[in-house]
Amino acid sequence: MRLRDRRNILFTLTTLLLFMIILLMGFGIIDFRIGPGSQVMTESLSAGNDNESADFIYQGENTDTVINPPDADNYSAGELENINVYDRFNEAVVNITTEVVGYNWFLEPVPRKGSSGSGSVIDSRGYILTNNHVVENAYKVNLTLADGSHFEGEVIGSDPENDLAVIKFDPDGHKLVTIPFGISDNLRVGQKVLAIGNPFAFERTLTTGIISGLGRPLRNDKGIVIRDLIQTDASINPGNSGGPLLNSRGELIGVNTMIYSPSGGSVGIGFAVPVDTARRVVPDLIQYGFVQRGWIDIEPVQLFPSLVRYAGLPVSQGVLISQVKSGGNADEAGLRGGDHDQAVRSGSNVIYLGGDIIIGIDGEPIASLGDFYAALERSRPEDVISVTVVRGRREITMDVVLTTRTGGED
């Protein structure tokens, strides 16, 4: 009898405990989300305007005098180089944490901890350069400076195709240290680099390494190919995303963005977006909230096996033109969209068959939507490109004058 009573008591207590846990989860007090809170993209696979943007000037070479520590004789030349870069620019690296909107068991919107990462102060008025994936979907962006002061920032521009974003905050009288922009078209494999960031919330951590490779194209988890990435063996871990990759003079040459890792931690293969890409897109992000790129006025659909089989298409890879905007640049160039009498449904999307299939842009093969967007990534409105399509069984190439892509097309 006593054993049975004890079992009944244990069963009752266990049931009550489970009920309390479920109740607390429902009210959002306990959060059993799966996945890490801080992000670094792994290869193992809010836009606004700013009236000051027209005055934005990249920070030039820092003219501060390099001061060696009093006991400089105790360090090698390489160590002094690391010390000087860190002493001059670590305060220009900020810690970024975000909050996102989640839902509890009662489907009520509740705040949730989002991702965390790093950012570089690139202008003394409060502009911060970071990764798009660090601030993506955030409704609140919290910034922590080197002196421990906290600010709330606003994402004023984002570029998912290069995984870059710009945050603006009001320094409120704080004198900000900024990181000067270098250039990345003269980088060499074997060149020394330094990374400063906040891996695993250890603020302003310095790691060093070399450039292991240049011009690396990598497809991110959204299927977008980011081109010309810098590969480095400097240790990059979750929390480093968005932080600066510096040369030995302390100039920004890249923005740390992803790692290749089976485990999620650093194995010596990290990647950074080159600073020349940032130079090209940051002014647009500040002024428009997006990058002004060229666009073809079509509704593109990536080919997939069941569609190819059903429609009996002559190619298995490419981008089908489902619709052409009437009077748009594609229409004027002679590109053809699908027939509304040949509509098929794929999930929630309606696809019109019979249109041209894009297989090349300016000589680059187009096999997917990722290739299509990548081919237009560096274009500007009014540029003229050559588009190769399959029409029936023929290949046709025609010139198209690009219009402006506002970001809504993707």
Image (spheres, helix red, strand yellow):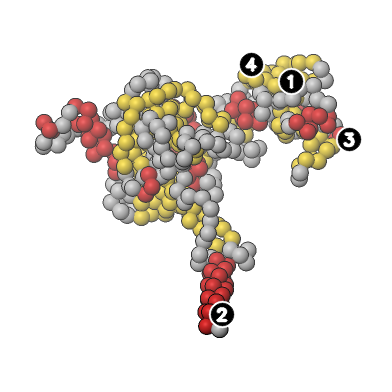
Q: Amino acid at mark 1?
A: Val
Real-space Cα separation, disc 4 to disc 3, in angstroms: 33 Å
Q: Nearer the viewer, mark 2 or mark 4?
A: 2
Q: Residue at x 47, y 40 (%)?
A: 263
Q: Are marks 4 and 1 in contact (CB under 8 Å)?
A: no
Determine whether, in the image, residue 259 is placed left or right of residue 309.
Answer: left
Q: Residue at x 76, y 16 (%)?
A: 395
Helix, strand or loop for disc 1: strand
Helix, strand or loop for disc 2: helix
The residue indicated by pointer 3 is: 341
Q: Amino acid at mark 3?
A: Asp
Tag shown at residue 389: 1
The residue indicated by pointer 2 is: 4
Real-space Cα separation, disc 4 to disc 1, in angstroms: 12 Å
Q: Tell me which numbered mark, 3 or 1, is placed earlier along the sequence.
A: 3
Q: Tell me which numbered mark, 4 or 3, is placed earlier along the sequence.
A: 3
Residue 111 x, y percent position in the rendering? 52, 60
Q: Residue at x 79, y 32 (%)?
A: 307
Real-space Cα separation, disc 3 to disc 2, in angstroms: 73 Å
The residue indicated by pointer 4 is: 363
Real-space Cα separation, disc 2 to disc 4, in angstroms: 79 Å
Residue 266 x, y percent position in the rendering? 41, 37
